[in-house]
Image (cartoon, rainbow, N blue to C red):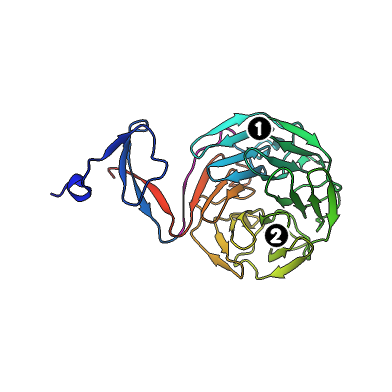
Amino acid sequence: MTTYKEIKGTQIEAVASDPSNPVEGQVWYNTTSNVLKGQAATTAGSWSSGGTMNTARGMSAFAGTQTATLATQGINNSTDTVVNVTESYNGTNWTEVNDANTARGQLYGNGTQTSALIYGGTAPPSTLRNETETWNGTNWAEVNNLNTARYAHWGVGADSTTGLAVGGADATAIVGITEQWNGTNWTEVNDLNTVRATAGAAGTYTSSIAMGGQTPGSPGRTSNAELWNGTNWTEVNNLNTTRRALAGLGTSTSALAVGGDESPSARSAKNEEWNGVSFVELADLSAAREYEGASGTTTAGLAGAGRNPPTTSLASTEEWSGAGAAVTRTFTDS
């Protein structure tokens, strides 16, 4: 029987932590977790289990990358109460950090793990919020408010100095309002073509895409997608699966539309990639979920928290490895 050393010319390496940049075909034994691992290459994108959050919740705000994500606030769907908890992810574990100043859920955020922005939201049963806060890597600070208090909106932005708050619902209706953040103030700009809430979004405050969402009336869901060029919204090709309460990640030319719900009783695991022209269905999430958060890119992304079924909050996360990307596999004896 041919041994690994005879094939590769070396013994299997024993290490305390996984290599930071393993190559395809590399195998090692992790002495901390006591598991044998190897590096493979995928020809199609796939989801794998990420670290479990300390506090389960849905309707929270995510910002950052796959290996450096900030998740804050949200709602415990079992008790319908706000979870004022902020957690930081290092690619393996979630760690609780300092809380925000204003407790809320159904808010949105953007930026990075060390420079983030959150805005709007609601405190059950019906208190709308317009507060905005910035994160400097350690603490949250209150800054100028949104012009329109709302919840179930979405947003994009590179850091705490830029942001785009779009759609959502105010005290009376679902809206198409768009506001831009310049680091100091919010300014109302041109509205969406299709008013909606709980859409998926990706991009920056000058170049972004809105995907799906909840619309007024029946059936209350849309597959419409729109692109923002810094001035106007333009309708583009639709999602393949109509849904609301989904998450988005990536850029305006390379984005993922993840999860959501397709009907009042059907949570979705669907994952579609926007390539700048149309949406293509890719590998589904391992667990269907709605009102989840997301971060990262179409090469290396993260989706986590949310709920499924409607009264159960989730703490699990999943990591996305894009097509052709290398992925670490754990070997078992089964």
Nearer to us in this view, 82 or 301: 301
Q: Compute the Cα span from label 1 to label 2.
A: 30 Å
Q: Which residues are magenta?
A: 45-55
Q: Main secondary structure of the magenta part?
A: loop
Point out residue 317 in the picture as x, y percentages from the top left corner.
Answer: 53, 43
Which residue is labeled 1 in the image? 85
Q: Residue at x 64, y 44 (%)?
A: 63
Q: Is residue 124 visible?
A: no
Q: Is residue 302 above or below residue 195?
A: above
Disc 1 secondary structure class: loop
Q: Residue at x 84, y 41 (%)?
A: 145
Residue 301 located within the stretch drawn in magenta = no
Indicate the amino acid at tag 1.
Val
Q: Quadrant of residue 159?
A: top right
- Please tell me how many numbered marks the rendered image carries: 2
Q: Which mark is residue 301?
A: none
Which residue is labeled 2 in the image? 207
Q: Residue at x 61, y 44 (%)?
A: 64
Within-10-Å neighbours for mark 2: few <14, some 14–19, many 20+: many
Q: Is residue 26 above or below residue 217?
A: above
Q: Is residue 119 visible?
A: yes
Nearer to us in this view, 31 or 280: 31
Position of residue 8 in the picture relative to residue 153 (left or right): left
Nearer to us in this view, 267 or 118: 118
Disc 2 secondary structure class: loop
Position of residue 183 in the picture relative to residue 10 (left or right): right
Q: Are marks 1 and 2 in contact (CB under 8 Å)?
A: no
